[in-house]
Image (spheres, rainbow, N blue to C red):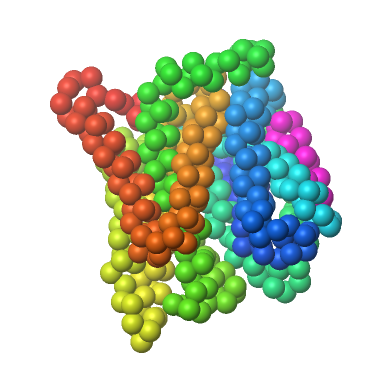
Amino acid sequence: MNKDISKGMVWLLAIACGLIVANLYYAQTLVGPISAATGLSPQAAGLIVTLTQAGYTVGLLFVVPLGDLLENRKLVVGALLFTAVALAAAATSTSAWTFLAAALAIGLGSVAAQVLVPFAAHLSHEATRGQTVGKVVSGLLMGIMLARPVASLVADASSWHVVFGGAAVAIVALAAVLRRKLPERVPASPVPYTKLMASLWHLFLSQPVLRRRAAYHAGLFGAFSLFWTVTPMMLASPAFHLSQTGVAVFALVGMAGAVASPIAGKLADAGHTLMATAAALALGVVSFLLPLLAPDSPAMRNAALAILTVASIVLDMGVAANLVLGQRAIFSLGAEVRSRLNGLYFALFFAGGALGSAVGGWIYASYGWHAALLAGAAFPALALLYWMSEYLASHGSASSIDYTM
């Protein structure tokens, strides 16, 4: 590979990842109207989000590794067409079970985004790989952050059916564009699928970089999931009295944190992964400590909202930066295993996200807002303590861990 990836291709991959991953988050702000329309009980309404995430996790473990076996462009286009059918099924659902099955399938097909990220790394030169991955991940994070407010605003103007129907059309169009624009990428040394899957456990055991980076991001993503589980409830509570549209605007402002992705990529390319990781984890801790300083007085409501807005941006910056640092590190471990490493990486830290969401909702309901903030701060704080072991090892012995390679 003599020529580096073009700017146009980076933009295309970034936009594609954003559009694809947004499918996972449309339903999060629409649980109420969807459950009411499909007859899902309030006790089971959480399945709308849970099954989408479950499908995504299954896809990360069993579909994304196919990027090391099959021609990547065909794999991506096939996954997108599958996702479009699932989105259309969700848009036309009239029963709970139909929608829940569609939600599971949406998560499963949306792992196409995690085939495209290592695809971008493959197309990049080693010297610019971190910057390229950072820009593509910026698009992915923009999709995550935009999905919730866009879904809320569209549903307010029309209905939740339009949200999923529009997403189905967008994904079909994206599949057509990628089919034309992506170059073919056939893995150099494909192995049978059974051996491919059996190798996942071996990769987990044999790659300390993977385990460490997954642990770091599990802490931050757990905090991120906790924050976006409890904060919309807090904003809608008597403390702030924000409408659904107000919550959507709040989520839009948080998008500013995505700016950290390309910055983190440059730092990784320059060999500063270790300290940049500490900064990202510290931002995660600070983002939960800031709202604890907010005044409780109704007269100071705007000041408290401003502090919470800053906290959301700081948290998103930490998450965006650390995700790029992690992917840059694991993509340096070998082109022939990039898809498997990426799938494992995401599956592991998504477990942290699931824990954060579950713990956050329970603590908020049982002990209140301040307790939820302290629990959120604990996730990246524990990851930062784990980071100390790497820092001490790198400064206390000659055989330090090299993540920049």
Identify the image quadrant of residue 94: bottom right
Drawn side of residue 41 relative to residue 95, left or right = left
Q: Quadrant of the N terminus?
A: top right
Drawn side of residue 376 relative to residue 197, left or right = left
Residue at left offset 74%, top offset 64%: 36
Q: Is residue 74 above or below residue 132?
A: above
Looking at the picture, tell me which residue is in the foreground, 46 or 301.
Answer: 46
From the top left corner, tell me how far across and down residue 221 is, in percent: 45, 46
Q: Is residue 161 above or below residue 10?
A: below
Magenta span dominant secondary structure: helix
Residue at left offset 70%, top offset 39%: 109
From the top left corner, tell me how far across and down residue 149 is, in percent: 60, 65
Identify the image quadrant of residue 107: top right
Q: Which residues are magenta?
A: 73-90
The single residue placed furthest to the bottom in the displayed view is 299
Could you tell me if residue 313 is visible in this image? no
From the top left corner, tell me how far across and down residue 278 is, in percent: 28, 43
From the top left corner, tell me how far across and down residue 316 is, in percent: 43, 55
Q: Quadrant of the C terminus?
A: top left
Residue at left offset 66%, top offset 45%: 51
Residue at left offset 62%, top offset 62%: 29
Looking at the picture, tell me which residue is in the foreground, 330 or 92.
Answer: 92
Drawn side of residue 388 relative to residue 361, left or right = left
Residue 67 included in the magenta stretch of the image: no
The single residue placed furthest to the left in the displayed view is 396
